[in-house]
């Protein structure tokens, strides 16, 4: 991956009175918003995999994530030169990193907790969390700053930080049944590829979050995924097309190399349609972006080997059913597209032959999305 500067999502964080509950949900919940976003402060590009810590060698399973945190200036480790990857993350540390993520805004009031006096080293960070309605502490008016953050609480607060997007419990883990208080939040973590659990099929929701796990959660959340070429790095999830009066149709696209106006595209999604009768012949395919990408780039046009050069082809890009881009091109024309796909879950690419001829069946027209890439 090549992380870039992370932009915190817009969010409205109303006070959460239930955080003062003595129930497991309330106690766990407070702990985590703090933790997950913990080190998201201001990511910068990762230049190398070496972490610089004596206990995180280059073959450490989380070396990339931890190295990224260092280069993002989200952590400097401990004075002894270690990162302590298996150590637990405390609530006060989580508060500090979340506060940093927000740009360390001015705090207008005291934290208000009996165990967080004005001279507490993390006072402003914790007070800011209260101001924002991110936490209200425990029922006994404590914040318990040194308590560890659990994995289920991390899931709950990361989900809240992202605006509580809709999600459905998927039964991914044997220890997170549908009636678990954080079932939806944990499933959302999986669906967003922020967490994958353990090899034995468990999530271990009540276990404390370790520093290496937190590094992984935040890296996956904050760092954009590597660019992916559709049809190569990312496979379609649906395809189709209309048949018109033909016995064959463009029901989805084919991968391979094409030339558009003399330009060679080694990786393209192409389709052939016929200029025939009074129907528009259409082919399409869809990809699941998981709301993880921000830009879709491609070059569209008819390929140089099309046997009919008087057809008009409509190229349309849809995001969750909404038209994001549309071009109508004839042979010899091409357009480089740069489409905003921020927040898009399902991307559809569609090509349609809109030409209508009265002289019957004619030669087919081939057209393509050249090098269709999301990043």
Image (cartoon, rainbow, N blue to C red):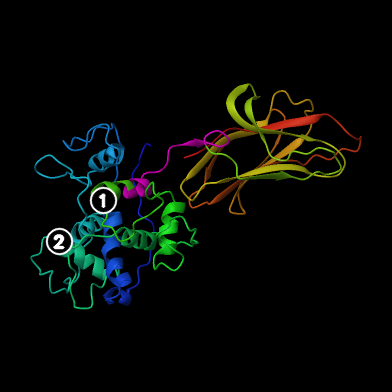
Q: Magenta segment: does it hold 224?
A: yes
Name the residue: 35% across, 41% down: 4
Q: Name which residue lies at 74% across and 38% down.
A: 250
Residue 242, above or below 272: below
Tell me where residue 80 sits by quadrant. top left
Task: Determine the residue positioned at 43% across, 37% down.
Answer: 226
Is 249 a magenta residue? no
**Residue 313 visible from this viewpoint:** yes
Of residues 18 and 322, the one drawn nearer to the viewer in this rendering: 18
Q: Between residues 337 and 92, which one lies in front from this camera angle?
A: 92
Does dot 2 land on a helix, a strand or a loop?
loop
Q: Are marks 1 and 2 in contact (CB under 8 Å)?
A: no
Please indicate whether residue 121 sits to the left or right of residue 229 in the image. Answer: left
Badge 1: residue crowd in 10 Å (few <14, some 14–19, many ≥20): many
Residue under the point 55% across and 33% down: 232
| For residue 222, above or below residue 51 | below
Q: Which residue is mark 1?
A: 39
Which type of secondary structure does the marked residue at label 1 adopt? helix
In the rendered image, the vertical position of residue 364 relative to residue 198, given as above or below: above
Q: Tally the marks.
A: 2
- The residue under label 2 is 122
Residue at the right extreme, as displayed: 359
In which quadrant will I find the N terminus? Answer: top left
Left or right, residue 131 beside residue 347: left
User: Percent position (x, y) of residue 148?
Assistant: 21, 60
Start and end of the magenta stretch? 217-233
Of marks 1 and 2, which one's residue comes earlier in the chain?
1
């Amino acid at each position: 991956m090549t992380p870039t500067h992370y932009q915190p999502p817009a969010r409205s964080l109303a006070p959460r009175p239930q955080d003062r509950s003595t129930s497991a949900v309330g106690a766990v919940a407070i702990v985590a918003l703090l933790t997950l976003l913990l080190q998201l402060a201001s990511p910068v590009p990762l230049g190398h995999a070496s972490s610089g810590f004596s206990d995180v060698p280059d073959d450490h399973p989380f070396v990339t994530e931890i190295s990224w945190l260092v280069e993002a200036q989200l952590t400097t480790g401990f004075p002894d030169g270690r990162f302590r990857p298996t150590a637990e993350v405390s609530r006060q540390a989580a508060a500090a990193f979340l506060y940093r993520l927000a740009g360390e805004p001015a705090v207008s009031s005291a934290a208000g907790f009996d165990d967080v006096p004005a001279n507490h080293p993390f006072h402003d960070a914790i007070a800011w969390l209260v101001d924002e309605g991110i936490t209200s502490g425990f029922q006994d008016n404590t914040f318990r700053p040194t308590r560890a953050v659990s994995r289920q609480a991390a899931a709950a607060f990361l989900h809240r930080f992202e605006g509580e997007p809709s999600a459905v419990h998927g039964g991914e883990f044997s220890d997170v049944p549908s009636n678990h208080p954080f079932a939806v939040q944990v499933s959302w973590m999986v669906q967003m590829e922020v967490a994958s659990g353990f090899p034995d099929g468990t999530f271990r929701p009540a276990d404390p979050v370790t520093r290496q796990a937190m590094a992984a959660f935040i890296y996956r959340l904050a760092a954009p995924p590597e660019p992916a070429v559709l049809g190569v790095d990312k496979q379609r999830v649906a395809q189709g097309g209309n048949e018109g009066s033909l016995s064959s149709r463009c029901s989805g696209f084919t991968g391979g190399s094409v030339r558009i106006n003399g330009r060679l595209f080694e990786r393209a999604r192409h389709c052939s349609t016929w200029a025939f009768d009074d129907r528009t012949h259409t082919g399409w395919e869809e990809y699941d972006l998981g709301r993880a990408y921000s830009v879709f780039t491609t070059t569209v046009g008819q390929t140089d080997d099309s046997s009919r050069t008087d057809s008009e082809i409509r190229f349309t890009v849809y995001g969750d059913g909404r038209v994001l881009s549309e071009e109508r091109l004839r042979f010899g024309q091409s357009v480089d597209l740069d489409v905003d796909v921020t927040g898009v879950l399902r991307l559809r690419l569609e090509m349609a032959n809109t030409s209508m001829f009265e002289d019957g069946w004619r030669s087919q027209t081939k057209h393509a999305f050249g090098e269709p890439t999301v990043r």
